[in-house]
Image: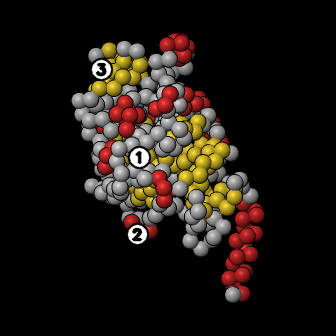
């Protein structure tokens, strides 16, 4: 497994020209799941900025996903002859971001990493992304990003925190395990072949983000598992996800919807992200405890409105499994501590038994 060590004490603001500190953005509404859960029992936050841009905070660690801070009316270029116009404003501007420790970028497309963002981000900000995006971000000569980490499908990277220890157990440190998940932005077949030649739509990853604790390079206890679909269609490769995570709960799914259709609304030829129907199919395949839709109304090429998804969810009887966030809303959840392990559950149980007996004696 690859490793990346970050030090929140030295991370600072994510942009080149801004210094000082900024507070974590204030939410319009805070939501929990189930709705009667207590906010004081939560220890992690997901703040929705817009498109697929979210801010995840847990144990003082902050990860920003797919940064896109354009405003309504701004254009993005999405491939030869394909552009789109933003319809919404982000919840905050990039200059209002607080300290960020790393960026998770699903693919190198301007509605996920726009040109002003590419200009403004600090060059040494760690970015975890696809091999394709890495090749783009590190081929800018003196202006290249210097800490870009590529993950293939099912390849993992553990983000370790420098120098911190979780409460009550000096051996275990908060860690985030990020694993690349399969995704296809173009349907398989002749169009995919044509796209490979034209390089119009870039390769994309989904992600499995596991928030947990680690006591060594190969040891990790998951406390909360988040699957992010990325800009994918419903493809056969996604079936491998529930197989690989069999017997391991997926707590949250962030699904990129919108039914993005190119070249555009006046010529709707090819859908390249999930619409409402595919979104419900993905819920039925992955079976997460909770799903939050993102990437649903921010560009004019997103042609499947969120209301279509709401209806499809009701029809499928899955209403209690979905939570809706507006831009500026946040979702608060609880990362479990001291349960489960992806490496040697038996050994951990032994360790726990030892601790319990030690406490009993003490
Ligand atoms: Zn997109």
In this orientation, which residue lies closer to the viewer: 289 or 10? 10
Marks 1/3: CA–CA distance: 34 Å
- Quadrant in the picture for the N terminus: top right
Q: Tell me residue 269's x, y (percent).
A: 38, 16
Residue 56 vs 306, above or below: the answer is below
Contact check, label 1 and label 2, Cβ < 8 Å: no
On whether ligand 1 comes within 8 Å of the CB at mark 3, the answer is: no
Q: Which residue is mark 1?
A: 14
Q: Which residue is mark 2?
A: 40
| SS class, disc 3 | loop
Name the residue: 53% across, 38% down. Answer: 146
Circle 2: is it few (<14), some (14-19), or many (20+) Cα within 10 Å? few
Circle 3: is it few (<14), some (14-19), or many (20+) Cα within 10 Å? some
Q: Tell me residue 126's x, y (percent).
A: 51, 44
| Front of the two marks 1 and 3 | 1
Left or right, 328 with respect to 343, comes to: left
Q: Earlier in the sequence, mark 1 or mark 2?
A: 1
Contact check, label 2 and label 3, Cβ < 8 Å: no
| SS class, disc 2 | helix
Q: Which residue is mark 3?
A: 265
Q: Tell me residue 140's x, y (percent).
A: 48, 27
Residue farthest to the bottom, as pictured? 362
- Quadrant in the picture for the C terminus: bottom right
Display coloring: secondary structure
Residue farthest to the front, as pictured? 142
Q: Is residue 257 visible?
A: no
């Amino acid at each position: 497994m690859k490793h990346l060590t970050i030090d929140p004490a030295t991370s600072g603001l994510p942009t080149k020209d801004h210094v000082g500190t900024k507070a974590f953005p204030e939410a319009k509404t805070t939501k929990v799941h189930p709705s009667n859960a207590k906010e004081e029992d939560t220890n992690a936050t997901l703040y929705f900025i817009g498109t697929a841009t979210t801010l995840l905070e847990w144990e003082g660690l902050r990860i920003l996903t797919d940064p896109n801070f354009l405003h309504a009316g701004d254009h993005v270029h999405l491939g030869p002859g394909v552009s789109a116009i933003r319809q919404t404003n982000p919840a905050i501007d990039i200059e209002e971001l607080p300290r960020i420790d790393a960026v998770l970028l699903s693919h190198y497309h301007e509605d996920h990493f726009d040109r002003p963002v590419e200009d403004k981000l600090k060059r040494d900000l760690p970015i975890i992304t696809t091999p394709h995006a890495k090749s783009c971000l590190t081929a800018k000569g003196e202006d290249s990003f210097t800490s870009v980490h590529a993950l293939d499908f099912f390849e993992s990277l553990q983000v370790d925190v420098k120098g911190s220890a979780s409460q009550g157990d000096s051996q275990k440190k908060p860690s985030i395990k990020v694993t690349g998940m399969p995704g296809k932005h173009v349907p398989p077949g002749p169009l995919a072949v044509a796209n490979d030649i034209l390089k119009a739509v870039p390769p994309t990853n989904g992600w499995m983000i596991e928030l947990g604790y680690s006591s060594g390079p190969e040891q990790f206890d998951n406390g909360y598992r988040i699957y992010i679909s990325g800009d994918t269609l419903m493809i056969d490769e996604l079936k491998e996800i529930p197989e690989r995570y069999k017997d391991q709960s997926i707590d949250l799914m962030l699904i990129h919807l919108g039914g993005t259709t190119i070249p555009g609304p006046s010529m709707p030829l090819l859908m390249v992200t999930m619409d409402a129907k595919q979104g419900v199919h993905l819920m039925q395949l992955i079976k997460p405890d909770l799903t939050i839709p993102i990437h649903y109304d921010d560009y004019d090429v997103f042609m499947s409105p969120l209301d279509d998804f709401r209806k499809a969810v009701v029809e499928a009887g899955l209403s209690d499994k979905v939570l809706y966030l507006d831009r500026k809303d946040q979702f608060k959840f609880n990362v479990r501590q001291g349960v489960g392990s992806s490496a040697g559950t038996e050994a951990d149980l032994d360790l726990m038994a030892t601790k319990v007996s030690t406490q009993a004696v003490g």
